[in-house]
């Protein structure tokens, strides 16, 4: 018997309703009845059409494009649930926008990730459930518990099923030095070696590949990243390892922002396939790329929601 005796209620904003529906399907629940719209002047309007008093409420909302609109939807939904006397409110944020603004890179820079964390806490969230924060220290920006799940777990299961574990024909490649820890853990899961692309970033959204640490000669390489935004870094790294003798290049990333020239760059690149997770939906105004495939995160988010509700450890989801 559960000590709190609450019922799970899952609601969603407009950023990723398909993922929210998938989560509910795995929970054998229907999505909560709420209307999320805008007034004529652009202000966010939230109407919740069912009682939430004393319930365990989970609000599924990625703060992806349009970032500020989706963030305001999340904040106002949290406030609405708090004022309706929800027992506990968990903000399920598959993609946490502003995560790349986690430090002062130069004088007079804001630390926007900290500000967003403060806003979510002030709105009334009791907990945050997210996936692959750009920087792990962002968890410390919150004064409430944060569960940061690993997208690489999903990719590892996929590639082991597809290529097998310990296949020496394959090699994990980190697209930059900052992603080394993530790539190393991923390579251990797959039981294969690792290489690193060393690059120097000249300015925002542009990078220059310098050299490769490790041998990729004759290998089928898997590039692992957390975010694909304009895809400049990813396609540049793919070109570098291909020029260094890689036989094939695959890529995977948790969050597919796919802004600006990203899709065209991926189509024109030497990448055979780019795997993304559905934390961010494919841009509706863009033509589908044959190179881009999606894996769903709905089962793992549903399992995490169950663990939170039952007061169990989420880390057990990632045990071998």
Image (tube, rainbow, N blue to C red):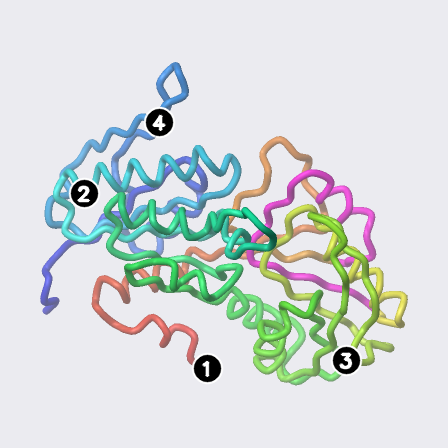
In three-dimensional space, the C-alpha distance between marks 1 and 2, rounded to whole angstroms, equals 38 Å
- 218 over 86 or under it: above or below: below
Q: Residues within 10 Å of mark 2 (few under 14, many from 20)?
A: many
Q: Position of residue 253 (x, y in %)?
A: 61, 59
Query: Left or right: 245 with respect to 25?
Result: right
Residue 69, position in %: x, y?
Answer: 44, 33
On residue 169, the disc is 3
Query: Which label number is shown at residue 320?
Result: 1
Q: Which residues are magenta?
A: 248-272
293 relative position to 65: left or right: right
Residue placed under numbered mark 2 in the picture = 82
- Which mark sits nearer the N-terminus, 3 or 4? 4
Q: Under tag 4, what secondary structure?
A: strand
Q: Is residue 274 above or below residue 282?
A: below
Residue 301 position, x and y percent, is: 38, 59
How dense is the environment of label 1, judged by Cα within 10 Å: few (below 14), some, or many (20 and up)? few
> What's the distance in space between the residues labelled 2 and 4, CA to CA?
17 Å
């Amino acid at each position: 018997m559960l000590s709190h005796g609450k019922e799970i209620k899952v609601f969603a904003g407009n950023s990723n309703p398909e993922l929210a529906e998938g989560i509910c399907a795995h929970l054998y629940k229907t999505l909560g009845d709420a209307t999320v719209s805008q007034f004529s002047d652009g202000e966010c309007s939230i109407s919740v059409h069912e009682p939430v008093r004393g319930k365990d409420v989970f609000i599924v909302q990625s703060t992806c494009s349009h970032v500020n609109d989706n963030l305001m939807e999340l904040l106002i939904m949290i406030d609405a649930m708090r004022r309706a006397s929800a027992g506990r409110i968990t903000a399920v944020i598959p993609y946490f926008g502003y995560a790349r603004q986690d430090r002062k890179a130069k004088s007079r820079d804001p630390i926007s990730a900290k500000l967003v964390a403060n806003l979510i806490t002030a709105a009334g969230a009791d907990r945050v459930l997210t996936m692959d924060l750009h920087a792990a220290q962002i968890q410390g920006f919150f004064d409430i518990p944060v569960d940061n799940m690993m997208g690489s777990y999903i990719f590892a299961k996929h590639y082991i099923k597809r290529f097998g574990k310990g296949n020496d024909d394959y090699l994990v490649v980190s697209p930059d030095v900052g992603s080394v820890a993530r790539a190393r853990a991923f390579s251990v899961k797959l039981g294969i070696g690792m290489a690193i692309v060393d690059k120097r970033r000249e300015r925002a959204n542009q990078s220059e590949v310098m050299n490769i640490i490790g041998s990729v000669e004759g290998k089928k390489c898997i590039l692992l990243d957390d975010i694909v935004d304009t895809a400049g870094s990813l396609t540049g790294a793919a070109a570098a390892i291909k020029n260094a003798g890689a036989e094939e290049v695959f890529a995977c990333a948790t969050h597919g922002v796919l802004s600006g020239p990203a899709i065209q760059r991926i189509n024109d690149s030497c990448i055979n396939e780019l795997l993304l997770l559905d934390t961010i939906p494919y841009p509706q105004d863009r033509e589908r790329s044959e190179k881009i495939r999606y894996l769903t995160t709905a089962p793992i988010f549903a399992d995490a929601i169950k663990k939170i509700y039952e007061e169990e450890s989420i880390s057990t989801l990632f045990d071998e």
